[in-house]
Image (spheres, rainbow, N blue to C red):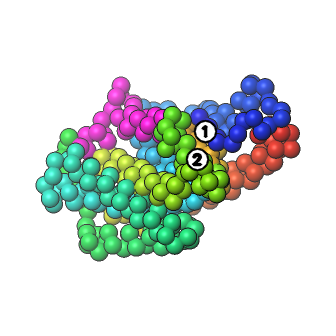
Amino acid sequence: MALDEAPASSSPRRAAPSAGLLLTNEFGLIVLILLFGAGFAALAGGFLSPFNLFTLGRTVAVSIVIGLSMMAVIATGGLNLAVGAIGVCAAMACGYAIEVLGMPWPLGVVAGLAVGAALGWVNGWMVVRTGLHSFIITLATMSIFFGAMIFLTRAESYRALPAAFTTIGRAKIGGVVSPLLLVTLVVMLALVYLYRFTALGREMLAAGARPEAAELSGIRVDRIFILCHVLSGFLAAVAAVMMVARNGAAIPSMAGQLGQDWLLPAFLGPVLGGTLLNGGKVSVLGTALGALLVALLTNGLLLLQLGEFWIQSFLGLLLLLAVLIDKSRRSFLARRNLA
């Protein structure tokens, strides 16, 4: 579902509905997912096994929310390089609240989500106050958040979590489907409702598309930008809590050094899905399909016993190609007044 705030009346000529569908990122991603899925099913042994599909589902569930976390800030034309660091901080806060403070696990989850939203607010407030691009601010806070987390927790994991909590990440619905996918579906529906049906969501897109015009129309752009970072931090925390439930423990290295392991999937989902890097347009469904494609490729290539280095190189190349193809596609549509 693409949500574009550009005025529709300005286009002198429009593509037919069927042609418009074929030109969408979502359609292209669905075709690629089907092609790669069929290829891996034929070439990679065990790709369609119930265990592999369950594992793939759990990975996709977390990856989609990570991509949505980045999408929330890209909507403003910004970036959030601290997605992984915020996620790890939220996960460790959740583990600390449950294991050390003895909170019931639902309250521990709330504590983790609150920490994620609070760190997102710090990012947004600093971006607005300093006027620096969010790339610089979040690059700095990525190290600050992660370093503070390591200092406070002494890099110790929290593994004595209640079975009622960790069961959510390990349970199977129908022998194949992970409950984490249902959590992701709820998050996606909530974001579609936010951007499509609420004034706040429309203000987020308007502020990202044309901040000066949005300011003149009465939108408090600074406040909106901060809220977008809060939303990004909250979603990063949701992904982190899901990962804690999946792993059965809160681990400082769950997102790699400084949380950098989350960066590539965080960018790939929104960019492949059609979210504009200069802000003003998001695609919740496209981000989900982009994350699914990336997880599918990673899973299939691993089953084909391709080395981790080659997989990372392939995903990086995929990101570069996606940006170039998207730029070419928009130029093509603009020349024909189709966008």
Give the residue type at disc 1.
Leu
Q: Amino acid at mark 2?
A: Leu
Is residue 9 among the parts visible in the rendering? yes
Q: Distance between the Cα atoms at labels 1 and 2?
A: 8 Å
Query: Which disc is residue 247 wearing?
Result: none
Contact flag, marks 1 and 2 (Cβ < 8 Å): yes
Lateral position of residue 27 relative to residue 268, left or right: right
Q: Is residue 184 left or right of residue 24?
A: left
Q: Seen in the image, is 184 located left or right of residue 241?
A: right
Q: Residue at x 64, y 57 (%)?
A: 212
From the viewer's side, name the closer residue of 173 and 237: 237
Name the residue at 42% across, 39% down. 187
Of residues 290 and 130, the one nearer the viewer is 130
- Quick check: is 190 in the magenta stretch? yes
Q: Which residue is mark 2?
A: 205
Which residue sits at x=48%, y=35%? Answer: 193
Q: Give the image location of residue 314, x and y in percent.
A: 63, 55
Crowding at mark 1 (Cα within 10 Å: few <14, some 14-19, many 20+): some
Give the structural element (helix, strand or loop) at label 2.
helix
Circle 1 SS class: strand
Q: Residue furthest right?
A: 335
Magenta stretch in the rendered image = 165-193
Label 2 neighbourhood size at 10 Å, few (<14), some (14-19), many (20+)?
many
**Residue drawn at (65%, 53%) of the image:** 213
Name the one closer to the observer, 272 or 252. 272
> Residue beneath label 1, please?
3
**Farthest residue, direction left:** 102
Seen in the picture, residue 58 relative to 177 is either above or below; the reply is below
